[in-house]
Image (tube, rainbow, N blue to C red):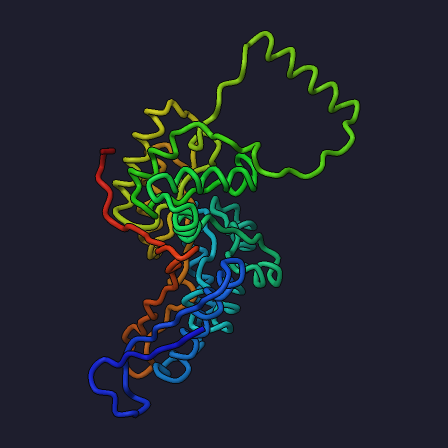
Amino acid sequence: MFLTFHPVGKDNGDDSVIGDIDIKISGTWVDTILYEIPILALTSEAFFKFMDTDWEYDEQEQKAFDKGMRLLGAGCVFSEFGTRRRRDYHTQALVFRGLTRAAKEAEKRGLPGKLSGTSNVHLAMRFNIPPVGTVAHEWFMGIAAIVNDYTAATEEALRRWVGCYGPGVLGIALTDTFGTPEFLKAFSKPIRGVDDHPKPKPRQPSIADTFIAAVDRLIGEVDGPTPEKTYAQVFTGVRQDSGDPAKFVELMRKFYDEQGIKDRKVIVFSDSLNIDRCLEYKKVSEEAGFQPTFGVGTFLTNDFVHKSTGKKSVPLNIVIKLNSAAGRPAIKIRYVIAASMV
């Protein structure tokens, strides 16, 4: 791992000099992917421990409780996605205490919302709530570089994902790595080659297995072969992480309708959320026939003001992205989607 500091202006060696930190991690993908979360969390914690120190923990648990109650009372299904840019570990633990207390209170009152989980596996275990998450941009970026076919990478990444986990398992697809319109072209294709992936050694079939297989054969003889399903059919839904959420909802509604898909699909919103945005996106997506859920991050785990002024203590804008794989560049294309497919 290599760390470089790039000062903004003149660097006189004083601790007050500000600038940008550039962190490079090299190694095999299976090893380096594990660095992202702790490095970003530690970077944020260090900044607010040594640089921006005019804040305190008071009311963090209560603030999280109040936010949770508002979301749950409004019928929002949401999870906590705030590890990478949290103020520090203690803050996140306080937030969890507030959220889990809100979830219990909401259940007692019969409120319609739900705290569905967290992306932090450790805190999921500690507070006894489900660990949840979705596929990352890095998966599509890495596949594109490794197979050296950027135009076909989206379908290849979807194919390998389904081949590993199975249809409908971990079924929230991220649409914007190479642009949502390009993603939807791949999403509409039939799933191919899933059986090419290694499978666990099959167990000895039971009488029930034999009976079910016989029934399936009979159904096939009557109805003919089962048509191939598309990725859009088997995935539970999609995640919106950039662009205009209302236009994204419109685009996805048009896409599913054109595909003849009548299931009530899920849209996970995860881009810079707060309560007002959650409520707005909930209304828009439900009116379009979707089940909205929300991955709320920094708004929960890094929401502070300066003690001396009462002004916002601004979280860091930090991110780690895959730079290259197999000696080839890994890229992400980000642009605002149009309201209709090209």
Does the image show residue 268?
no
| Vertical arrangement, residue 79 with respect to residue 95, above or below | above
| Vertical arrangement, residue 195 with respect to residue 316, above or below | above
Farthest residue in the top direction? 222
The image quarter containing residue 260 is top left
For the point 45% across and 76% down, the residue is: 57
Residue 113 placement, left or right of 251 = right
For the point 39% across and 76% down, the residue is: 3
Does the image show residue 182?
yes
Where does the image place residue 262, in percent across and percent down from the top left? 41, 25
Pick the front one: 152 or 81: 152
Where does the image place residue 86, in percent across and percent down from the top left? 43, 68
Q: Quadrant of the C terminus?
A: top left
For the point 23% across and 80% down, the residue is: 8
Q: Quadrant of the N terminus?
A: bottom left
For the point 32% across and 24% down, the residue is: 258
| Vertical arrangement, residue 338 with respect to residue 208, above or below | below
